[in-house]
Image (cartoon, rainbow, N blue to C red):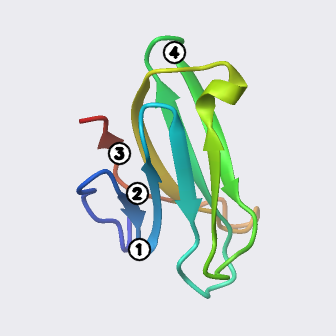
Amino acid sequence: MTGSTVAQAGDAYQGNDRTNYFSSNNMWVCDEESDGYGVHGDFDFHYQGQRLRLDESGGADSSCDSKNAGSWGVWGLWRHRTVEERPAWNDLDEKGAWDYRH
């Protein structure tokens, strides 16, 4: 995984792209690279055994997308990671390391 780093302080990185959480229910994803690749976050919840995907819709525009997981009816964030999306023909999405809820 090129550019993947170990997550610290609640951030999970893939290169400079990142995900984080504000509490057990609030999550966000940021595209911090002007490389033309989309970014999303994978968020796993241990109580329901469910994975939610949060897409970053603006590209590298200095803004992040956020969502309260409770509005999707899930609670208890377990872990999250950042995924940089590659074209379908390549199918080699770059997945960062998981950050586990502290």
- Report if the CB atoms under discs 1 and 3 are less than 8 Å apart: no
Q: Is residue 93 visible?
A: no
User: For residue 76, which quarter of the picture?
Assistant: top left
Circle on res. 96: 2
Mark 1 vs mark 2: which is more N-terminal? 1
Residues at marks 4 and 2, CA–CA distance in whole angstroms? 20 Å
Left or right of 80 on screen, residue 33: right
Mark 4 vs mark 2: which is more N-terminal? 4
Q: Where does label 3 land, which residue?
A: 98
* SS assignment at label 4: loop
User: For residue 63, which quarter of the picture?
Assistant: bottom right
Q: Position of residue 15 (x, y in %)?
A: 41, 74
Residues at marks 1 and 4, CA–CA distance in whole angstroms? 27 Å
Circle on res. 49: 4
Left or right of 8 on screen, residue 81: right
Q: Nearer the viewer, mark 4 or mark 2?
A: 4
Residues at marks 1 and 2, CA–CA distance in whole angstroms? 8 Å
Q: Residue at x 73, y 68 (%)?
A: 87
The amino acid on which the numbered mark 3 sits, given as a three-letter code, is: Trp
The amino acid on which the numbered mark 1 sits, given as a three-letter code, is: Gly
* Label 3, residues with CA under 10 Å away: few <14, some 14-19, many ≥20: many
Residues at marks 1 and 3, CA–CA distance in whole angstroms? 13 Å
Q: Where does label 1 land, which residue?
A: 15
Residues at marks 4 and 3, CA–CA distance in whole angstroms? 16 Å
Mark 1 vs mark 3: which is more N-terminal? 1
Left or right of 43 on screen, residue 67: right
The amino acid on which the numbered mark 4 sits, given as a three-letter code, is: Gly
